[in-house]
Image (spheres, helix red, strand yellow):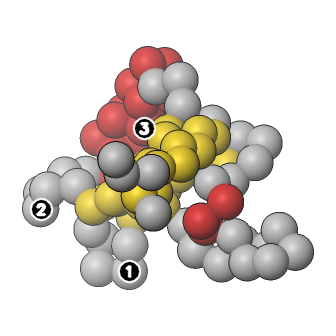
């Protein structure tokens, strides 16, 4: 049997615009981050985000982020050992 460990965290989603004006969504920790995204000592070592399709505007990215904030309860990650 495969052993696994699942972690959950709440995130606020924010619409962002990159240097090339490409739209993306950033996941900002609400209260705590997923353990696999932290260094020892609790410092943030990484972040989550996803790119939106080419042609998506910053305003549309903000709308997508608001939709996610309204409908996503938690983000989870399962690590298989």
Q: Which residue is mark 3?
A: 65
| Local secondary structure at mark 3 | helix
Residue 51's label in the rendered image is none
Q: From the viewer's perspective, tell me whether residue 77 is left or right of residue 52.
A: right
- Label 1 neighbour load within 10 Å: few <14, some 14-19, many 20+: few
Q: From the viewer's perspective, tell me whether residue 77 is left or right of residue 53.
A: right
- Label 3 neighbour load within 10 Å: few <14, some 14-19, many 20+: many
How far apart marks 2 and 3 lie (CA) works out to: 16 Å
Q: Is residue 27 visible?
A: yes
Sequence-wise, the earlier of marks 2 and 3 is 2
Q: Which residue is mark 2?
A: 54
- Total count of labels: 3
Where 81 sits versus 19, above or below?
Answer: above
Residue drawn 29% across and 41% down?
Answer: 60
Q: Nearer the viewer, residue 6 or 81?
A: 81
* x and y percentages locating residue 26 in the rendered image: 48, 56
Q: Nearer the viewer, residue 79 or 39?
A: 79
Residue drawn 59% across and 65% down?
Answer: 36
Residue drawn 39% across and 25% down?
Answer: 67
How far apart marks 3 and 1 lie (CA) works out to: 19 Å
* Residue furthest right as drawn: 41
Where 5 sits versus 45, above or below?
Answer: above
* Residue furthest top as drawn: 71
Q: Are marks 2 and 3 in contact (CB under 8 Å)?
A: no
Q: Which residue is mark 1?
A: 19
Residue drawn 46% across and 50% down?
Answer: 4
* Residue furthest left as drawn: 54
Q: Is residue 13 visible?
A: no
Q: Are marks 3 and 1 in contact (CB under 8 Å)?
A: no
* Residue furthest front as drawn: 1
- Label 2 neighbour load within 10 Å: few <14, some 14-19, many 20+: few
């Amino acid at each position: 049997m495969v052993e696994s460990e699942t972690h959950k965290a709440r995130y606020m989603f924010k619409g962002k615009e990159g240097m090339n004006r490409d739209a993306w969504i950033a996941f900002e920790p609400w209260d705590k981050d997923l353990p696999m995204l932290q260094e020892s000592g609790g410092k943030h070592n990484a972040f989550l985000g996803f790119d939106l399709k080419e042609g998506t505007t910053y305003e549309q990215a903000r709308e997508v982020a608001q939709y996610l904030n309204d409908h996503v309860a938690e983000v989870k990650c399962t690590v298989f050992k």
